[in-house]
Image (tube, coloured by chain):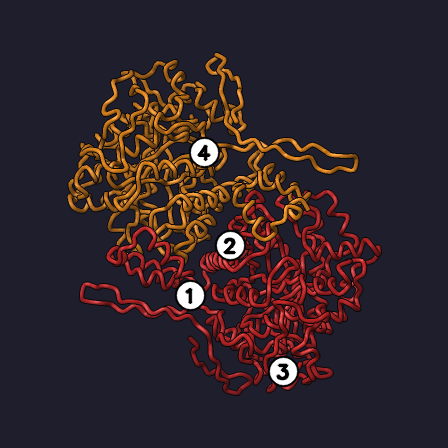
Chain colours: A red, B orange
Amino acid sequence: MYEEREVLVGGQPLRLAIPWTEVLLQPSAGPDGPVENPPVRLYDTSGPGGDPETGLPRLREPWLTARGDCEELEPMGRGAATGADRGGERAGFPPFRGPARVIRRAKAGRRPTQLAYARAGVVTAEMAFAALREGVDPEVVRAEVAAGRAIVPANVNHPEAEPMVIGRRFLTKVNANLGTSSVRSSVAEELEKLAWATRFGADTVMDLSTGPAIGTTREWLIRNSPVPVGTVPIYEALERVGGRPEALSWEVFRDTVVEQAEQGVDYMTIHAGVRLAFVPLTVGRVTGIVSRGGSIMAAWCLAHHEENFLYTNFEELCEILARYDVAFSLGDGLRPGSVADANDEAQLAELRTLGELTEVAWAHDVQVMIEGPGHVPLDKVAENVALQQEWCHGAPFYTLGPLTTDVAPGYDHITSAIGAAVIAMAGTALLCYVTPKEHLGLPDREDVRAGMVAYKIAAHAADVAKGHPGARAWDDALSKARFEFRWEDQFDLALDPERARAFHDQTLPAPAAKTA
Amino acid sequence: MYEEREVLVGGQPLRLAIPWTEVLLQPSAGPDGPVENPPVRLYDTSGPGGDPETGLPRLREPWLTARGDCEELEPMGRGAATGADRGGERAGFPPFRGPARVIRRAKAGRRPTQLAYARAGVVTAEMAFAALREGVDPEVVRAEVAAGRAIVPANVNHPEAEPMVIGRRFLTKVNANLGTSSVRSSVAEELEKLAWATRFGADTVMDLSTGPAIGTTREWLIRNSPVPVGTVPIYEALERVGGRPEALSWEVFRDTVVEQAEQGVDYMTIHAGVRLAFVPLTVGRVTGIVSRGGSIMAAWCLAHHEENFLYTNFEELCEILARYDVAFSLGDGLRPGSVADANDEAQLAELRTLGELTEVAWAHDVQVMIEGPGHVPLDKVAENVALQQEWCHGAPFYTLGPLTTDVAPGYDHITSAIGAAVIAMAGTALLCYVTPKEHLGLPDREDVRAGMVAYKIAAHAADVAKGHPGARAWDDALSKARFEFRWEDQFDLALDPERARAFHDQTLPAPAAKTA
């Protein structure tokens, strides 16, 4: 459901339709008759839905137009293959032929970023929307964004997204990785995974496609995604140079970033902290460099014996990202790939560099979050947050898990949900999910579900532990329903109602037993 | 595999066959040719196997005979229905007709408990066996048992069990709940679940049967269990009085305990801390009293307005348990059933009482562990261990989960594995698993697997975090295999090799890809 709310934005009234999952409850049996239970409203990321061929409605378009800080360009490549897949159409990857759109880019001298507005004291429509769905004052979102402690990822070319905020003062968020590979997949399959991810509460998705038709797949995903979309542009850049890291260059990378920014990517993982001098620090590791982006950049550095071109061109990159309000997700290319390698000097040297780069990005009004590991034993988890917050000046932390043990391939959604809950409690703002297929293969729809549910559990457990206002109300409503044997209410309130219902049916199939 | 080891026990050499899962590894490719990887030995609880109709070999029989502290009685009811199921044979519940056995009970004036021996400075065969499989000195086990900080649950009537130790200095252990209900099940199904539980590493099992043929089911399980078996005797006592709590009495309960002790139950959950005065403390709770044993005792107390008969007869109960070396698992009948009720006065008042009772049991040389919650938000988890350790004088803590959020029925193996890992890291010695069916129905074989794997992950993650000697070697061996693309080694080292193999196959089916 959407709830109509009116807020003042820049002194002007603005009507916003805030998405919720509203769960209606049965009354409790009281001594003097039934006692009403108020409906429970849950944060909802599934979006308005619609026909994937046309894409989602462009919620943000009037706000963007009203701000007038962007020029509107003729689209390049709309409806045709773009980027690395210029070679033509492939089976399963038809071009997106939805309604025409313009490409927005900052007017000369303007910085259309949420950070620039926040610093100028302006509450944008995006901030207001994000605040209302969190249940907080829009000014709180503005202040946190202005301080760099939160981001509202919102590329001016992704008007379909429903704005949200990532920061430790807000609900812990979850990212779901999607993406094709050369082994398999199709646009239809990716769109289905996108729908499942947001149905189960994905707050952002990353398109990590590496196979054919990267640009086409991304176009379909962005036009149909109600949540911000992230990418790792080095993957596409590598496709453009035939898969040889040593053939990469700043120019190829820059062009890739511009095209992705014009498509509407909301945040980009940039491995600018993999400095040449840090690569030897990984030699004694059990698992070397396991980040794909990290490996690519390390290979480039070693092949040329030159400093990482993402580091040396970082200021120009900031200028590009500022033009579209693409947020940095500063990648941890040297993250540990095993608990043995956690919190080692390679990892920490890179983290210090990410702290330096954060200040550079902020100087260009570009929003920043910092990526973190990976594989970390439970006793070293909290230290990761403490160091990241200190060295990166409070920028939001975005971690993959971490996995707390390496012995359970096939169950890494669980090995890592444990670490995710603990690291979120310690202040991580965004958790990148891990599916049961981690280390073994590409996730399918059911793996997306399993990963999402495990991570929503971790995120919510952390929010309850942090005493996030309102978080525990959900638990209490479900527990009360459980104690009163209101089975249907329990199911409706469950994170995965379908699963809860099915499991109950299997052993106690009689309807009588259900209301006992 | 079993490894023959000779140790000195009481100055005499004793040969012990220590169980291991030995994983042979492929060599790594080195610059000068293949480099051997030593085999990895993992703790193994699956037992020697064999025909369920005859039961497992009686490993401990010569040790028990040699100690000579027990009289050997004619068995009552062997091969016939026992206990609450005296009514006769039921479909699916044939009597166990294995080889004849004697019933052991302490000779007058003797206390055949591990605690009594430990206090007397004697390392028993059981302690030595438990120590060798842990990789520690037997004297460490003796000292920890003597101090009450560890238990070796080993009823003199369960000679089939392979001894193990529960205590914070040792590997974190996992219990799997089994048991029939009135809704369904059979002996064959329970034996299959037992086999699955120990295959995936259950260190103990609890038989929580509540339906027909309780005694028969238990006989089959004990005779075939290579791990200690626990029960909640009040469940059977309730069956004996027709399911009416108010009809319970100390005499009925006592007779039930004696029969279970003579069958070979290694530890019993006793809800002696649910005192009459504490029941009103639960009135304001969201979920009242959710422990079945706690509810039964609270109902009895209120019906009679008398103090809990388990509390008032606790000394006599100690004398009975001492005769067979049954360990107490002092139950938390007032544990929270929702995060809202965690760490409240009802829970803590009972915990203080359990501390008192611990000292009483120790005065009778009876081993003790303490049960803990339940449902606890992450920020309140560590406090549970701190208070339990302080108030219960270091007795081992045995917790159910805890679940860290109530919003995910169908996934409570995950909501609780998070809490389990954190509480184990803080010092909990034994974790009671939770399956995906928790709150919804009875677990089947696949649920047992899912619960066990989630909890072995939690336990091992805690052991790695605690720096338990040797724990991380398993992670490192698997990570090294992963980094070197030794796929078969990865699978063989996995907690669930079958699952790891299957998941890999699904997306990368070509054999070539597997060794890439």
Q: Of the residues tagged 2 and 1, which is closer to the observer? A: 2
Residue under label 1: A470
Q: Are callouts 4 and 2 both on one chain?
A: no
Q: Are marks 2 and 1 on the same chain?
A: yes
The chain to which mark 2 is attached is A
Give the quarter of the image for residue A89.
bottom right
Q: Name the mark nearer the viewer: 1 or 3.
A: 3
Residue placed under numbered mark 2 in the picture: A421
Q: Contact (CB < 8 A) between labels 1 and 4? A: no
Do the residues at pointers 1 and 4 share their chain?
Answer: no
On the image, numbered disc 3 is attached to which residue? Answer: A101
Residue that extends furthest to the front in the rendered view of this protein: A91
Q: Quadrant of residue A312?
A: bottom right
- Per the rendering, the mark at residue B167 is 4
> Is the residue A499 above or below the residue B392 in the image?
below
Under mark 2, the amino acid is Ala
List x then y, in percent, for residue A79: 65, 78
In three-dimensional space, the C-alpha distance between marks 2 and 3, rounded to whole angstroms, equals: 40 Å
| Amino acid type shown at disc 3 | Arg
